[in-house]
Amino acid sequence: MDIIPPVEDISERLLFIYDRLLQCYGAQHWWPADGDFEIVVGAILTQMTTWSNVEKAIDNLKSHNLLSPAALYQIPTSEIAEEIYSTGFYKSKARKIKAFVTWLHDYYNDSLDGLFTLPVLSLREILLSVYGIGEETADSIILYAARKPVFVIDAYTRRIMQRIGINPGGDSYHSFQALFMGNLPVNEKTYNEYHALFVRHGKERCRARPDCAGCCLSAICSHRNSIVSG
Ligand code: SF4
C-alpha cells in the first residue's frame, strides 16, 4: 500500500499521482508520430477534435506526399484545407499550418533543426509569435518535437487536478503550468509521460461524467471523497 502524502506537500502529491497513473496505464510512448514535423502538424490539427480525426488528416497528407514543410509551403491553403477536412475547423487550421510553414521557410529555410536549437524560453516566445500557435500548441511542439522540458496543460489536466483538489491559485494556463514546473524536477521525459497519462486518464475514466469506482487516484481525490461521504 502506498503512503498517501499530506495535502500540503504538493511535490509529493504530484509524484504520487504520476506513480499511480503510470502503474495503472503503463508508459504511453508519446507523441504518436513518425517525425518532428508530423508532431508539429498534429499539434495544430488536434485543436478541438479527436485524435482519430487527426490521424485521418495526417494519413491524407502522407499519402499525397505533402507532409513536409517544403511541400505544404508550395501548395495553396485551400488544398491544405481539403486534405485536413476530417479535423473540423479545417479552413482555420489550414491557415495556421500555412502560416507556420511560411514562417519556417522565411526564417529557418524549411528546417525545424535550426529552430529547435533555441533554448526553451526563446523557442516558446518565438512559436507564440506565429499565427495560430497558442500556449498548448507551442508547449506540445517544444515537449514532443523539440524534446525540451516544458509541461503541457490541457483540458484533461485542469479537470483532473480540479477534481482531485490541487488548485494552483488561479485558472490561467500559466498558473497550472507553474504548479507542475515549480513542484516537479525539470525533466523532459517525466513531463512527456505525465501529460500523456493525464490524457489517457481523462479519456478513459475522469471523463465529463467520471467513473470513480476503482479509480487509481480515488484515495486522494476530493471529488470522490465528497461523493463517498455524501
Ligand atoms: S476518483 Fe473520479 S473524479 Fe477523482 S480522478 Fe478518479 S475518476 Fe476523476
Image: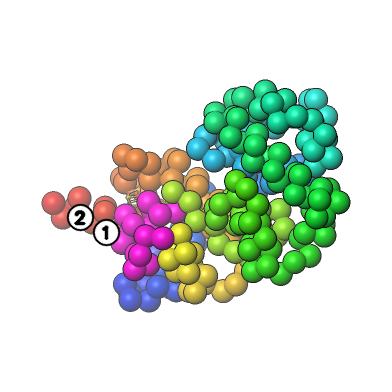
Disc 1 C-beta below 8 A from ligand 1: yes
Left or right: residue 61 versus residue 206 is right
Depth check: 183 or 25 in front? 183
Query: Which residues are drawn in magenta?
Result: 157-172
Q: Is residue 19 magenta?
A: no
Position of 197 with respect to 44 (left or right) is: left
Query: Is residue 78 visible in this depiction of the protein?
Result: yes
Of helix, strand and loop, which one carries label 2?
A: helix
* Residue 17 visible, this angle: no
2 and 1 marks in contact (CB < 8 Å): yes
| Residue lying at 46% horizontally and 59% vertically, measured from the top left | 173
Residue 156: x and y, percent? 44, 49
Is 109 left, or right, of 21 in this rendering? Answer: right
Q: Nearer the viewer, residue 54 or 89?
A: 89
Q: Residue at x 75, y 29 (%)?
A: 76
Q: Which residue is mark 2?
A: 226
Does residue 197 sit above or below 50 in this rendering? below
In the rendered structure, find residue 170 and report the number of the disc placed on it.
Answer: none
Relative to 227, 219 lies left or right: right
Q: Please check the rendered image and state whether residue 165 is part of the magenta-colored stretch, yes or no.
A: yes
Q: Residues within 10 Å of mark 2 (few under 14, many from 20)?
A: few
Residue sitting at x 31%, y 45%: 213
Query: In the rendered structure, which amino acid carries the disc numbered 1?
Result: Ser
